[in-house]
Structures are given as structure tokens and as C-alpha cells.
Amino acid sequence: MDPKLLDILACPLCKSAVQLNDEKTELWCKADGLAFPIRDDIPVMLETEARTLSNDERLD
């Protein structure tokens, strides 16, 4: 993912910064505990498409 794009992306719910996970398949918002998928190099920043982070992922 382009680092410039990552710099401007924010969680659509709380507007906090998101982090690229280690596998580079999701963007994590630790404030809301959500993981937004990346499909075909395009982040899907929709609440309905997000999954809830596990407790271990939140603490990572």
C-alpha cells in the first residue's frame, strides 16, 4: 500500500489513524477495535465490511 495513502486514511467512525497489519491485508483501528479489509490493493473503509479485532490484536 502506498505510504502516502496510509498517511491520509482515517477510521470512518472515530477519525483516528489506522495501522496496516503485519500481513498487509487489513487496516486496524485500535480505538474502535475494528479491522478494515484491503481488497485488490483498495482499502474497504466501511463499517459493515469491518471485523472486530480480538483482544490479542488490540494489545499488539
Image: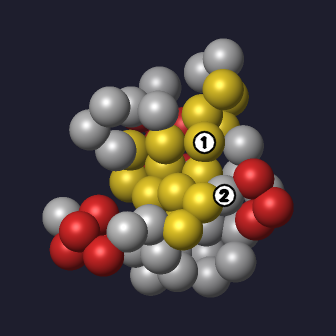
How far across and down, in percent of the image, does residue 40 sit? 66, 17
Give the vertical position of 35 relative to 52 (above or below).
Answer: above
Q: Is residue 23 left or right of residue 27?
A: left
Badge 2, how many Cα within 10 Å: few under 14, some, many 20+? Answer: some
Give the vertical position of 2 relative to 48 (above or below).
Answer: above
The residue wearing badge 1 is: 37
How far across and down, in percent of the image, does residue 29 sit? 47, 67
**Circle 1/circle 2 CB separation < 8 Å:** yes
Colouring method of the image? secondary structure
How far across and down, in percent of the image, does residue 1 sit? 47, 25
Give the vertical position of 16 relative to 23 (above or below).
Answer: below
Q: Quadrant of residue 59?
A: bottom left
Q: Is residue 47 left or right of residue 5?
A: right
Q: Nearer the viewer, residue 29 or 15?
A: 29
Of the numbered discs in the image, which one, if any, rests on residue 57? none
Residue 22 seen from this side: yes
Residue type at mark 1: give it. Pro
Badge 1, how many Cα within 10 Å: few under 14, some, many 20+? Answer: many
Q: Nearer the viewer, residue 37 or 19?
A: 37
Q: Residue at x 26, y 38 (%)?
A: 22
How far across and down, in percent of the image, does residue 39 sit? 66, 26
> Disc 1 on helix, strand or loop?
strand
Q: Residue at x 38, y 54 (%)?
A: 19
The residue wearing badge 2 is: 50
Residue type at mark 2: give it. Ala
Lower sequence index among marks 1 and 2: 1
Query: Which image quadrant: the C terminus?
Result: bottom left
Residue 17 seen from this side: no
> Disc 2 on helix, strand or loop?
loop
